[in-house]
Image: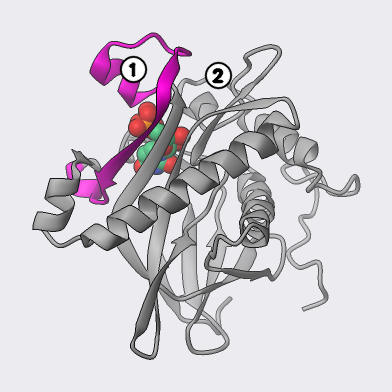
Amino acid sequence: MARRKQIYEGKAKILFEGPEPGTIIQYFKDDATAFNNQKHAVLEGKGVLNNRISEYIMMGLERIGVTTHFIRRLNMREQLVRHVEIVPIEVVMRNIAAGSISKRLGLEDGAVLPRSIIEFYYKDDKLGDPLVSEEHITAFNWANPQEIDDMMAISLRINDFLSGLFAGVGIKLVDFKVEFGRQYEGDMMRLIVADEISPDSCRLWDMESGDIMDKDRFRKDLGDVTDAYREVARRLGVLRESENPGQSGPVLVSDNGD
Ligand code: UDP
């Protein structure tokens, strides 16, 4: 890692310059933060699991024609992704009431929403990522109306894909957050899915027991956070039996010989 230039360090990931122009290496840390950084912990093995889960989901999206920044996984903690200009909006898609929408609108956690609801949040840690409307987004030029339409259409496709994927392994997709990036090719620009999709950015409930299998375990101090993420990975079939991230002992840093 010493040879590489660090571009950015976020709460759960570090970005390094990639090997070719237009690429970036996304390194998944074990750090977990919540409540706008007021709560922090290191959860051993989380980064390895999120790298794998996000790889699996991004590859699945590519297969249904949703373009993402993902190129390939490099090793246990890193993936090669396309360099994009991040749209400063977090798109949240909700199927079931939980978290901030329950508080804001006085809904019962677990209530099925009348239909899937899309929300936009302005990405600004200092402001605590405030909820914004399309009016704010266009007025302040964070994205144009066409981009908003594209983000909504793509998010609906992601919702259908993920809902089915998780339902198939006995997990309810309550909500998720997705980020988009602008990719420039000559004078063409397209929006592609960026960042990560993992139990850090989704709410996932076991269909039978209702058990929480996502970052709410950390937010609510429920414990066994990485165990829950590992169970998500195991059900999706992305963990080989021999791999057991988060257990004591040496951690394999690279599994493809580089
Ligand atoms: N979320 C996220 N990053 C954020 C805020 C939310 O990944 O900065 C995800 C969160 O994990 C949940 C969904 O977006 O799956 C909706 O989150 P909510 O607005 O309910 O906020 P929270 O209760 O997480 O503060």
- How many dots with numbers? 2
As drawn, 173 above or below 19: above
Residue 75 lies, with reference to residue 57, above or below; the image says: below
Q: What's the residue at 49%, 89% (across, down)?
A: 21
Q: Is residue 60 magenta?
A: no
> Magenta includes 107?
yes
- Name of the residue lying farthest toward the left: 139
The kind of secondary structure element at disc 1 is helix
In the rendered image, the quadrant that contains the C terminus is bottom right
- The reply to whether residue 43 is visible in this rendering is no
Location of residue 141 by image quarter? bottom left
Residue 26 percent coordinates (x, y): 54, 66
Residue type pointed to by label 1: Ser
Q: Could you tell which of marks 2 and 1 lies nearer the N-terminus?
A: 1
Look at the numbered disc 2 and give the secondary structure of its residue. Answer: loop
What is the span of residues highlighted in magenta in the rendered image?
99-127
Question: Quick one: label 2, few (<14), some, or many (20+) residues within 10 Å?
Answer: few
Please name whichever residue, 44 or 241, is drawn nearer the observer in this view of the structure: 241
Q: Is residue 189 left or right of residue 216?
A: left
Residue 233 against residue 253 in the figure, above or below: above
Q: Is mark 1 within 8 Å of ligand 1?
A: yes
Residue at x-position 78% and y-position 48% = 238
Q: Which corner quadrant holds the N terminus?
A: bottom right
x, y (%) of residue 9? 41, 63
The scheme the figure's colours follow is one colour
Q: Is residue 227 visible?
A: yes
The residue under the point 48% across, 64% down is: 14
Under mark 2, the amino acid is Leu
Residue hosting label 2:
222
* Quarter, ligand 1: top left
- Most extreme residue toward the right is 242
Quickly name the residue at label 1.
102
